[in-house]
Amino acid sequence: LPCLQSMTWTMENRRSSPADKVAIITLKLHDYSKSPSGETEVKFQLTRDTLEAMLRSMTYIREQLNAVRNSFIFLMHDHDGC
């Protein structure tokens, strides 16, 4: 799977109203299994609602990764003296 190399963002107006702003996210991905460059750029827009949903999902992913990491540290510590 490609790895995240970088992420940038800008704010843009979809219409004339300031309430119609969207975030334009640009992800640069690198796939080390492909040559020569294996680099891809992905752009997408997020409204406030879609950003909120994405942040909730990312928070859940972070919690799951922390739980796995903490379990691993506990197991390593638990078997330290063997």
Image (cartoon, helix red, strand yellow):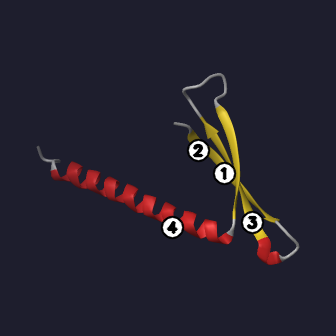
The alpha-carbon separation of the residues under discs 1 and 3 comes to 16 Å
Along the polypeptide, which appears first: circle 4 or circle 1? 1
Q: Extreme top residue here? A: 36
> Image point 62% across, 22% down: which residue?
35
Quadrant of the snapshot with the C terminus: top left
Q: What residue type is labelled 2?
A: Leu
58 lies left or right of 79: right
Q: Which mark's residue is nearer the viewer, 2 or 3?
A: 3
Callout 1 crowding tier (Cα within 10 Å): few <14, some 14–19, many ≥20: few
Task: Out of 54 and 75, give the one closest to the viewer.
Answer: 54
25 lies left or right of 18: left
Q: Where is residue 3 in the image (x, y as percent from the top left)?
A: 55, 40
Q: Mark 3 points at which residue?
A: 22
Q: In which quarter of the image is residue 65?
A: bottom left
Q: Mark 2 points at which residue?
A: 4
Callout 3 crowding tier (Cα within 10 Å): few <14, some 14–19, many ≥20: many
43 lies left or right of 68: right
Q: Name the residue under label 4.
A: 56
43 lies left or right of 13: left
Along the polypeptide, which appears first: circle 1 or circle 3? 1
The alpha-carbon separation of the residues under discs 2 and 3 comes to 22 Å
Q: Which mark's residue is nearer the viewer, 4 or 1?
A: 4
Q: What residue type is labelled 4?
A: Arg
Q: What residue type is labelled 1?
A: Met
Q: Which mark's residue is nearer the viewer, 4 or 2?
A: 4
Q: Name the residue under label 1.
A: 7
> Image point 33% across, 59% down: which residue?
67
